[in-house]
Each structure stands twice: as structure tokens, then as C-alpha cells.
Amino acid sequence: MNSHKQTLVIILLAASLLTAWISLNSIQFLSAQLSGLPGLEKIPGYSLFEEAINDKSDASVAAAPTPDYRILDKAVVSKDPNRIQAVLKAHGHIPTDGTGGAFGYGIITAKGLDAVKVSTTHKGVLDSIKQTNKNDAVWHNHYVSLGSDSACSNNPAVKQITYESPGGVIINDKTSVLSNLPATFTGTDALTKAKLTLSPGTDAKRVVSFALEPVFDISGTKLKAVCVTDIHDAVQKIINP
């Protein structure tokens, strides 16, 4: 009986080792083996399996996609010498509660970055008369002047910005309506508290979306710069004279 038990143990051990060896070789040559089976590609879900086998990319290095609410599918702008009206259609629902982070939409005129009409939402910075506190993400308008700042690398930085909210802005699901944006606005610079006049005019050239990145000092309490990043033009733009 003892000899039979020893023989049985040896057989089971050998079988386990053989199974492990077969499994290892099967994994190494799985792709080649599958390619030799006719009709396998017709099995539902096989294409996903094949992609998983052949995919050697590192998912961790993939760039984060632009959120759908920062993709403007269409922008319609109406203008006269005194004001601009605009209706912007985003690809996805536009957040109004701060969950979308700091971002906005802008109308760039023939004045370029010297005077830009923007609508924004953000938490963490109190820069508008429309906000009740710094964490109020209410949508509001600004006229801004953009320039360079080492803290923003190659991205434009906010150099001047109205504390007041020229014109109006209404958000409804995927739609943003910017109304009665004047050619010239005089108010207060939210950065310096000095009187500020910006005159972008009404000769609209571009409609864009963008993200905002505030940069604070080492203590984390003093705002050093606000960078405008990830700028994208509207996919379709209609400007009515």
C-alpha cells in the first residue's frame, strides 16, 4: 500500500508540473495560437480580447481628455458697433456648481489679447462683484487683458481684470448665452483696485474655451498669477454682422 501511495503522489506532482508548464507556454504563444483558429474573429467580444492581448501601451501616460463642457460645438455671434450677443453650444452639460473646476468661454476681437470678453466659473478666488465669497462658483463676466508671466510658462496670464461683470450670462444645460457685451467698459481692476477701462470693441474673430489655473505663493495664501490654459476654438463659428 505504501508503494502505491508513493506512486500516486509522484504521478500527481508530475501532472501539476506539466500543467503549469503548459499554461506558461500557452500564455507566451497565445496570440500566435489564436491567429490559427478560423472564424475566431466572429465570436462576440473577440476584438476587445485581441486588443488587450496586443496592447503594449502604458495607460498611465495617456493625456487626460478635454471635458465635454469645454468643447464648444457651435458659437453664434451677433454684433453691432456698440455690443455683442453670443450663444455658445457646448458638447456636454455645463456645470454651474463648481464641479467642473475653473474654466470659461471667451470672445476674442480684433484687439487680440489686450482686451478679451470672457464668462467664467471658479472657486477659490474672489474676483467678481457677482460672487458672495471666494468659493461661490456663480457664472460671471469679465473684461480681461492678457500678457506673459513666468509663473504661467508659455500660457497667457491675466494682467488686468474687471471686478464688475459687463453684460449678462445665462447657463442652461449645454448652452451659454452672453448678452449685451459692450464695446467698451470702465470699472475697477480686481487685482489692483484701480480704475480700469478696456475696449475690446465688437469685431469678433474667435470664440474659445479655456481653463484657469491660479498660482499662489509658497505660503498658499497670496495669489501670484492666474494662467489661462487649454485654449480651444469653437468647432463651428458663425458671426453675423
Image (cartoon, grey):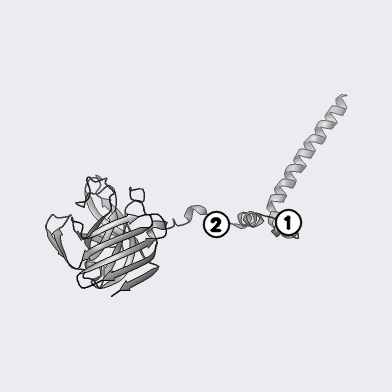
Number of callouts: 2
Residue depicted at x 28% and y 68%: 108
From the viewer's perspective, tell me whether residue 40 is left or right of residue 58: right
Quadrant the N terminus occupies: top right
Query: Disc 1 marks which residue?
Result: 33
Pick whichever, 194 or 4, lies toward us.
194
Q: State whether residue 110 is above or below residue 143.
A: below
Quadrant location, the C terminus: bottom left
Farthest bottom residue in view: 241
> In this rendering, does residue 134 appear at all?
yes
Tag 2's secondary structure?
loop
Give the structural element (helix, strand or loop) at label 1: helix
Amino acid bearing label 1 = Gln
- Mark 2 Cα-neighbour bin, 10 Å: few <14, some 14–19, many ≥20: few
Residue 57 image label? 2
Instruction: Tell me residue 22's x, y (percent).
Output: 75, 47
Whole-percent x, y for residue 72 in the image? 38, 63
Looking at the image, residue 97 lies above or below residue 77: above
